[in-house]
Amino acid sequence: MDAPTTLKKHDLKVTKIRLAILDALGKTELAKSYAELQASLAEFDRTTLYRTLLALMEKGVIHKALEENGESYYALCSDCSIETHVHDHMHFKCTICGVVQCLDLPKRLKFSAPGIHIDSIEVVAKGQCGNCN
Ligand SMILES: [Zn+2]
Ligand SMILES: [Zn+2]
Ligand SMILES: [Zn+2]
């Protein structure tokens, strides 16, 4: 799905900054930190960038992959909707180069607890990425 279609599907108007953020996050599973996004989208106002990230998160287009040491990392969602985020993948952070990515494992994460309905699970794995090990 191209970026304008993604936005429309999530009830968002197509704007320059929204397209730019989707473009910056790309089609890969790699997450980008707020600092990286800010650097590559320097033409946009900081407040606008921050608000746009919140709107995209609220509408199920992107998610926060990790929040660590005051830095947030964002990645595209694959199957989330306007109503809810449904995630059953984990996130990986390389302890050497710092790359953060969504890990789509062949085996999905499933947990259950009596009386509780789980929509999303946040698991962060750390180690060395393919470039560092
Ligand atoms: Zn999501
Ligand atoms: Zn690495
Ligand atoms: Zn993710």
Image (spheres, grey):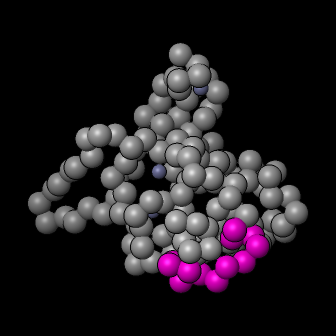
| Residue occupying the point 75% across, 49% down | 35
| Residue occupying the point 43% across, 34% down | 125
| Residue occupying the point 48% across, 37% down | 92
- In percent of width and height, residue 113 lies at 16, 56
Residue positioned most to the left: 114
Q: What's drawn in magenta, residue-wise?
A: 8-19
- In percent of width and height, residue 25 lies at 63, 54
Q: Is residue 124 magenta?
A: no
**Left or right: 45 as drawn, with respect to 49:** right
- In percent of width and height, residue 93 lies at 53, 34
Q: Is residue 58 visible?
A: no
- In percent of width and height, residue 72 lies at 62, 51
Quadrant where ligand 1 appears: bottom left
Query: From what the image shows, is residue 65 above or below residue 105?
Result: below
Towards the viewer: 41 or 115:
41
Q: Is residue 89 visible?
A: yes
